[in-house]
Amino acid sequence: MTRRKFRTYATLAGLLMAVGGMTVLVSYSVTLYRLFCQVTGAGGTPRRVAKDTATVSNTVMTVFFNTNVAPGLPWRFRPVLPKVRLRLGADTVVFFEAENLSDQPIVGHATFNVTPDKAGPYFKKIQCFCFEEERLDPRQRVEMAVDFFVDPKIAEDPNTQDVTEITLSYTFFRSAKPKRAADLSRFVTAPPDPVAGRKLFATQCSRCHTLDAARIGPPLAGVVGRRAGSVPGYSYSAALARSGIVWTPAALERWLAGPQADVPGALMPMAVPDTATRQAIVAYLRQRSAPLD
């Protein structure tokens, strides 16, 4: 082979490799960009982490939730709560509800981001339905958990010190890869999670209750199996004290669903209308109580 032919073949091979590389880059550019955003938080993309390693701060942040469904996907999709107030660094669980309005199983995929965009590197997800392609059966409705925290370093960064509110947004699209889907039925069949309940207790109950001391409400360690209105030294309403209720898990669920309806004249003003949230909180309280006979 002459030197001239060798140069020609070498140039042709180089061009083919360049074209092949560009083709691969174009084919996977969306995936690569998504991975880049998840690692760096660029473009308002929350970062994915294995666990919460942050120290909880006294600084409070409000996180709003926004949900959308793309045209052509017959799903209903909404947050169970429109917002939560949390302390920076606090491991927080919230629920979203999805319902398939069609008569066929459908696989969806959720895209997500936070605003303002500059909060992206500090918004960190531990678990989320958005990490998978998700299958929802005909007419099925499920509640899906998201486990996240906001890194306290957001309050130290001069660029984000003015951020007091963050909006987490999701949009569900019909999936292009339905064969890789996880089944959302796992959220229906899974038993209530006391670990999630501990986090929900911290965000929804801890302003009024602790486990070991009275605050606005009575201490709740050992509540499962205890007679209502029986903690010494705490001033209960007359209605609850004479109710005769024994706090079984079922009784606690009824109470949390609507204290005033359950015991007319009770003083507790707050309710937990969401079933999955109630069950997780009760699972946590049961874990922190003596076993029932």
Image (cartoon, helix red, strand yellow):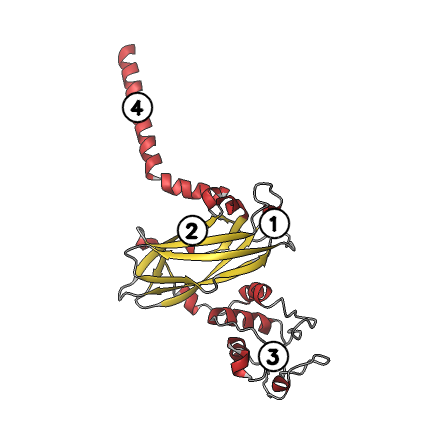
Q: Amino acid at mark 3?
A: Leu
User: Comparing marks 4 and 2, which lies closer to the viewer?
Assistant: 2
Q: Quadrant of the N terminus?
A: top left
**Residue 276: x percent and y percent?**
47, 69
Other-residue count near label 1 (Cα within 10 Å), few / some / many at <14 / 14–19 / ≥20: many
Residue at 54% x, 47% y is 122
44 sits left or right of 229 in the view: left
Return the residue found at the far right: 233
Look at mark 3 in the image and give the residue it sits on: 267
Look at mark 2 in the image and give the residue it sits on: 112
Q: Quadrant of the C terminus?
A: bottom right
* Residues at circles 1 and 4 in contact by the CB criterion of under 8 Å: no
Query: Mark 4 or mark 2, which has the lower sequence index?
Result: 4
User: Comparing marks 4 and 3, which lies closer to the viewer?
Assistant: 3
Q: Amino acid at mark 4?
A: Leu
Residue placed most toward the observer, 248 or 63: 63
Q: Amino acid at mark 2?
A: Phe
User: Comparing marks 3 and 1, which lies closer to the viewer?
Assistant: 3
Give the CA distance from mark 4 to mark 3. 78 Å
Residue at 56% x, 51% y is 164
Residue 273's place in the image compared with 3, above or below, is below
Q: Which mark is residue 15?
A: 4
Residue 190 appears in the figure: yes
**Secondary structure of the residue carrying numbered label 3:** loop
Look at mark 1 in the image and give the residue it sits on: 152
**Residue 43: x percent and y percent?**
45, 43
Give the CA distance from mark 4 to mark 2. 38 Å
